[in-house]
Amino acid sequence: MEQTGEYKEIVTIDVGVNGGLAYQKSDGTILLKKITNDYVQNSDILFSAVGNQTLENISIYVEHQSLRKPDILSGRWFNIHKLCIDYNMWLNIAMCLGGEPQSLKPQEWQSIFFVKGTTYKDKKKRLKEIATKLYPKEKVTLWNCDALLMLYYKNKVKDGTKIRRTRRLN
């Protein structure tokens, strides 16, 4: 994604054991980190990603996770429960480092990409393809594509308003 000028510093975090962190610096460069499920390691990952500075001037977005009735009925409740714990861990890490993290629902950021997959695997594959097109200079993987697409979405949202879906990206 080619842009010019000053950038907002943004951190986006896709929670979970196969998740990733994307940090857009003020000069537009992007740093990608794979995250773990360890509290201390993730604190170090976030702190080192932002250059050992406090997070008070950086916008932080953590992908929202919640346990829903269909997850309980389908027997997937334990996996979703674990994601909820990871989500809260990232909120706590960001606050401890001086940041004010905000929640970003998957339905919100995914809505602009028109991704319809018959299976979860198909949907993830399409999201990876879109991230590869939007960020050709980055090595896009399944663990970092959601964080990159969240970053793209937050760069397109102005003053908290929702953006209209005007063209197909896939």
Image: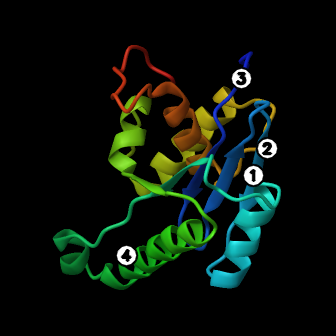
Position of residue 122 measured from the top left corner of the image (x, y, whole percent)? 48, 48
Q: Which of marks 1 and 4 is in front?
A: 1
- Give the mark nearest the N terminus, 4 or 3: 3
From the viewer's perspective, is residue 100 above or below residue 165? below
Q: In which quarter of the image is residue 3?
A: top right
Q: Which of 23 and 70 is in front in this view?
A: 23
The tag earlier along the polypeptide, 2 or 3, is 3
**Real-space Cα separation, disc 2 to disc 3, in angstroms:** 23 Å
**79 vs 139: above or below:** below
Secondary element under disc 3, as helix, strand or loop, is loop
Residue beneath disc 4 = 80
- Classify mark 3: residues with Cα within 10 Å, few (<14), some (14-19) or many (20+): few
Whole-percent x, y for residue 21 in the image: 66, 56
Q: Can you say whether 20 is above or below 31 in the image?
A: below
Label ID, residue 6 = 3
Question: Circle 2 is placed at which residue position?
Answer: 139
Choose between 2 and 48: the one closer to the eye: 48
Q: Mark 1 points at which residue?
A: 32
Mark 2 or mark 3, whichever is nearer to me: 3
Residues at marks 2 and 1 touching, judged by CB atoms closer than 8 Å: yes
* Separation of marks 4 and 3 at Cα, in angstroms: 38 Å
Q: Whole-Å distance between the Cαs marked 1 and 4?
A: 24 Å
Kind of residue indicated by mark 4 = Ile
